[in-house]
Image: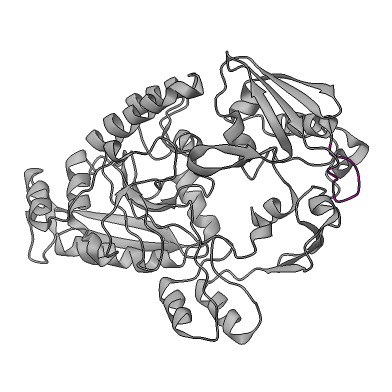
Amino acid sequence: MALYGAVYEPLVEYGEKGAFKPGLAESWEISEDGKKYVFHLKKDVKFSDGSDVNAEAVKFTIDRAKAKNETSDLQTLTNLEKIEVIDGTTVAMYFTKISNQVLAELCQTRPLRIMSPHSVEGEKVDGAFKEAIGTGAFTVKKISAEQVLMEPNPYYNHGNPVNYQVNFKTIEDGSSRTLALKSGEVDVVGGTLGSITDSDINSLKKDKSYNVHKFEGTMSHFLAFNPDNQVLTSTIRKGIELAVNKSTLSDKKLVGLFQENVKYVSTDNQENIPYDLNKARSMFESEGYVENAEGYYEKANNVLAFDLVIQTTEFPEWKEQAEIIESDLKKAGVKVNINIFDSESYYDVLWNTKKYDMIFYRTYTDALLPYNFLNSLYHNTAEGHGVLANDAKLTNLLDDFAVTIQEKNSNRYSAIFLNVFLKKHLLFQSITKMKNLLLQAKFQNSIILAYPMHQSILKNLW
């Protein structure tokens, strides 16, 4: 994602509180029926090979994305009827039905950022990929499994490029990243590019030899329940939520899944769940569980125990967070087995095998608008229930939201937060003390452990 964002730029960029601002498009108009978008491109913008950014390049990018992503659930691709070049700097997109997520989807890191037709053989939509040619700050000079060397795009920012190279090195272990910084092997660690542990961050803050920068993030981490686990009833989930002492995870009072600058989030559709160990125990007992000699609850000779799946390649801090939850739930009579997988195996468990009881996951880093995140994980389809939930009511709310003119959606999102997150679903969040405050909200089959990730100090990459 970091490499993609360094090479390619979007038509539209995220602004504050869910607003949008110009990217490669300087302005746009949306028809009243929400089915037509017209984009006016900035003039005199060039790709890294010196060719012009024009309406034909935009059409090529969108057409290729649609051809290459046949199973995509993005409105920009699934609802697209046709894309028309009006003139050299104007392009129109026509959709078969109301499509209110187009601007948000165009902001995303992939697959709709603008690429040059020269990137593929024959400049054909189905041509074989040859070279990464975009308008971003960098171009790819050399690439291998161990590192990617990027050099400045000479045409970036109207011929005012950055004056340094960036070498991305693959270091899969968080602690090893910190050691590489201390040895001088690398100059920058941390953030979504390469997370390090909270203890390492605090140690580096105390060492005057290093500069620690903190930026507002958009990513939340959460603990989700397997929707197919019949033991994890709403009562058990509620008990687990109450049993985690959030003061051991943060010294701040937290409410909500998304940050305050996320559109549709308000003080009226959030709720804080206090720590209450005694109430948690009573909820387990109400389900027929009795404490055994080892201090764990059991019923019919089955201990109340769950496997928690995490990975530390991308998120080394998950190990510490998981151990805190394991300790808190042990006090409440619930046994937690922490399973740490490599990144590839972890995602196979999450998306394919579903062999977990509880699992850590995160919102997407471009979650300033929550719809795509919710839709991708919590929406039921004809093939089965959502990845992390099985909730027809939430699915209907998301479907309703997707076909509503954007200006009318504030009340609909409050309905999603209030009627689904708060009344039926179980969450809590935490943040580390040195990171920015996030909100807390309830959500089906999930417990939130949220803390924003730092953006890279190499701001040009974003």
Does residue 289 appear in the picture of this structure?
A: no
Q: Residue 39, located in which quarter of the rendered image?
A: top right
Which stretch did the figure color magenta?
Answer: 45-53
459 over 229 or under it: above or below: below
* 199 w.r.t. 116: above or below: below
- Quarter of the picture containing the C terminus is bottom right
**For residue 137, which quarter of the picture?**
bottom right
**Residue occupying the point 85% across, 54% down:** 159
Report the predominant secondary structure element of the magenta stretch: loop
Is residue 79 among the parts visible in the rendering? yes
Q: Report the front residue among 134 and 156.
A: 156
Residue closest to the eye, 289 or 259: 259
- Percent across and percent down for residue 349 are 46, 50
Apparent side of residue 71 relative to residue 422 in the rendered image (left or right): right
Q: Residue at x 66, y 81 (%)?
A: 185
421 relative position to 291: left or right: right
Q: Is residue 126 magenta?
A: no
- Tell which of 108 and 322 is nearer to you: 108
Q: Is residue 234 above or below residue 380?
A: below
Left or right: 1 with respect to 49? left
Residue positioned 40% across, 28% down in the render: 410
**Residue 261 at x, y percent in the picture:** 44, 45
| Quadrant in the picture for residue 209 | bottom right
- Residue 62: image x %, image y %? 74, 31
